[in-house]
Amino acid sequence: MSIIKLLPDSVANQIAAGEVVQRPSSVVKELLENSIDSGAKTIKLIIKDAGKTLIQVIDDGLGMNKDDLKKCFYRHTTSKIRNSKDLYSLETMGFRGEALSSIASVSHMSIISNQDANDSLGFEIKLDGGEEKSFDEIGSAKGTTISVKNLFFNIPARRNFLKSDNVELKHIIDEFHRVALINHNINFIFLNNNNELFNLSESIFKERIIRIFGKSTKQKLIPINEETDIAKISGFVFKPEYSRKTRSTQFFFVNNRFIKNSHLNHAVKTAYEGLIQDNLFPSYFLKINVPLNSIDVNIHPNKTEIKFDNDQSIYAILKSSIKHSLGQFNIAPTIDFNNNINLNTPYSFKDREASIPKVDYNQAFNPFENLTKPVDLKTKDFDFSNFDDSALQDHFNNELEILKTNSFPSFQLKSKYIITKTSSGIIIINQKRAHQRILYENFLKELSNKVNPIQTLLFPIKLDFNSEEIRMLKLIEAPLIHLGFKFNSFEPENIEISGIHPILNQNNVNELFQDFLKNKDYNQNNTVHTLNDLIAKLLAKYSSISSNESINVKLQESLVNDLFACKDPNVSPFGKLIFKLISLEEIIKIF
Ligand code: ADP
Ligand code: MG
């Protein structure tokens, strides 16, 4: 006798409901998301007894016609995908077609909908535990109203499992925050037991954050802005001193959807390293936009966890952009930036002009003029055409034009240090370390670029290695090729190199490769991020100017400006101090 049976729909839906509907807040989330997908401009959320008695969502969106209203509460009915390909190009919040069927199966539900703004009549369907009870014409404005009453009325165990009204309300408010923050272009009204908890009108992101978390939030925010081929990151983080004991103000929105991701959270946490105590959490409101086909949102029924194709790169970009903004914020009092500073970073070279901090000086005055002895620098070291960015080139040319008439107040000491002044004191910069930092960030940027220039060698370089060394070099072959290296052959005993990165001097190639091998920092288990980091560091080491090189005042200026456009101008890629500011107060104290 066969013992395997197909489960009745009602049971299957209740099982699915266990995944989708854990508590009233899950219903709130699903209904709000459906209203957003319907294109609503205004959404009203009304709850009674923390959602245990009633959860109602009223929207002015597209609405459903009679046929759709009769279908929408069946399992796997959705208007949002047609075929499996759509799963990878999703712009909507829903797609599983599980929410309404799941919620309907464990509640008393009513859905009123009207698709026609010129018709004051719509339809209402009533369901008990997922069973249709009535279907009638009813007066209604355009849009949809869904009411969910007596959640889990037919699963007493689940109902008993619900926490106090306070706890359940807290969950609902959390869910509301997540939806309302990112959908700041929509008006939201939220009533609990007839008390208005929120009344948010359409606004920009920053204003929405302040409206939700209070006026005092305004002074805590630092803007974040970063754009690369892989991801666009924008939003705000809290200044380190406003870090909190809870994680309740940590928000990632990927392609306009709230998500949880411990890996990205770690990236933010490490960006704050040294700035906050270990037991505190930084607050953040970050939008991450990535190409639709580079993520998988389908791994969890709640759709709050996602997988990125470029996990490691996004980690690195996120960490460095936050570090950069925090750095700008810390350094701002000592070096005067333009008022309207754009916090873009060297990753986005097209906006570079706006991100270069200007060192404050009297353009007509140059007490150091007689001290400088400009000598031409080997073109390689500062050949900006290598970056293949005409905007940057133009900018650099303009800078040179200006410099022809106004000398930059800097001079070199011992062909090793650059000394310049700011409004608040004197800065002494270790030129080699500064150049290494600039190059390091450029190499990292190039590693996330699609195409990079190449310097073809007239005579290929052949290097001998043992098989273990070849195995190690294989690990970094791909990123090196990405950076402009060309390998004619990769034999078990030797490699032949016919192209190298344009900024690298070919006399240093052998030493560079020996250094790659010396480095114990990498092995097969290393992430792309660690390998890229290592390559960028060593390339910077072998391409930078030396600590015994005269450079003219124009190049001194570009070095200073490029340094302070870096994400982390404080330390070299090898963790060494790059510059020291001697403040006016310190100088006054001396005398
Ligand atoms: P999904 O959102 O995954 O498509 P749901 O079960 O949440 O699945 O909803 C099923 C369908 O019902 C949706 O695809 C949509 O066509 C329709 N629907 C649900 N809520 C609304 C709404 N507020 N306005 C218009 N249509 C809606
Ligand atoms: Mg949905």
Image (cartoon, helix red, strand yellow):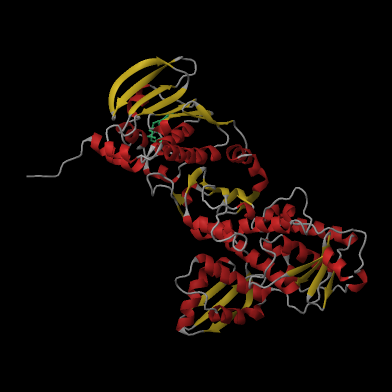
- Which quarter of the rendered picture does the C terminus lie within? bottom right
90 w.r.t. 410: above or below: above
- x, y percent for residue 507: 66, 81
Look at 33% across and 41% down and name the residue there: 161
The quadrant where residue 183 appears: top right
The quadrant where residue 399 appears: bottom right
- x, y percent for residue 125: 34, 22
The foreground one among 117 and 301 is 301
- x, y percent for residue 131: 27, 27
Q: Is residue 311 shown left or right of residue 148?
A: right
564 w.r.t. 456: above or below: above
The quadrant where residue 181 appears: top right
The answer to whether one can see residue 409 in this image is: yes
The foreground one among 461 and 309 is 309
- Which quarter of the rendered picture does the N terminus lie within? top left
- Ligand 2's quadrant is top left
The answer to whether one can see residue 310 in this image is: no
Look at 78% across and 51% down and name the residue there: 338
The foreground one among 486 and 341 is 341
- x, y percent for residue 90: 45, 42
How many badges with numbers are in the image? Answer: 0
